[in-house]
Amino acid sequence: MLCNCQKINTLITPSNRVVLGLIADLETDVYVYVKNTATGRIERQPNTSEFNGNVTLALNIPDESFYHPNAEYQVWVTLATAGNMYDTQTITLVDGVTASQCLLVSFERVIEVDNTFITSSQQTASV
């Protein structure tokens, strides 16, 4: 069970991916878990931390419809070798100051005056 997730700024959906932040293990296989706090549904994404420790969340997995506007999601990272999905890694946001075992994420759809959705190829988690 996760407690005290760090709330981050609202993200735009649809988007391709979100840079969550840094973990201590570089170029390491990890899992990114996403839990819809309303339904309890949890999705697991295999991933690899980058050379600098960055971990990203792909927003097209399992599919874009999973990420509902105005819903909240808990997001956390474990090493792929962890024996427990709640054996979380500390995620340090790109500000270099904010760190947490879990991020609380919400999404919002933004519509242009011509009724098309604003999209983003990549966003970065921030507070």
Image (cartoon, helix red, strand yellow):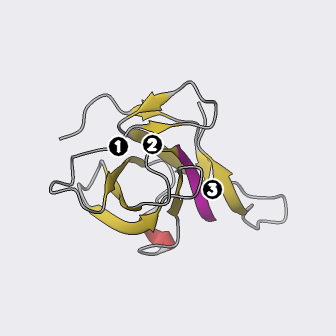
Q: Which residue is mark 1?
A: 89
What secondary structure is found at the residue carrying circle 3? loop
**Residue 102 location in percent, x, y?**
37, 39
Q: What secondary structure predominates along the stretch shown in magenta?
A: strand
Task: Name the residue that disc number 3 marks.
Answer: 109
At which x and y percent is residue 16?
62, 67
Disc 1/disc 3 C-alpha distance (Å): 29 Å
Comparing labels 1 and 2, the label whose residue is closer to the camera: 2
Q: Is residue 60 left or right of residue 104?
A: right
Q: Which residues are magenta?
A: 16-21
Q: Nearer the viewer, residue 48 or 26?
A: 26
- Looking at the image, the residue that sits furthest to the right is 114
Labels 1 & 2 near each other (Cβ < 8 A): yes
Q: Tell me if I can see residue 25 in this picture.
A: yes
Q: Nearer the viewer, residue 108 or 75?
A: 75
> Tag 1's secondary structure?
loop
Work out which quarter of the rendered image holds the N terminus and state it.
Answer: top left
Q: Which residue is mark 2?
A: 24
Mark 2 touches mark 3? (CB < 8 Å): no
Q: Amino acid at mark 2?
A: Ala
The answer to whether one can see residue 14 in this image is no
Mark 1 residue type = Gln
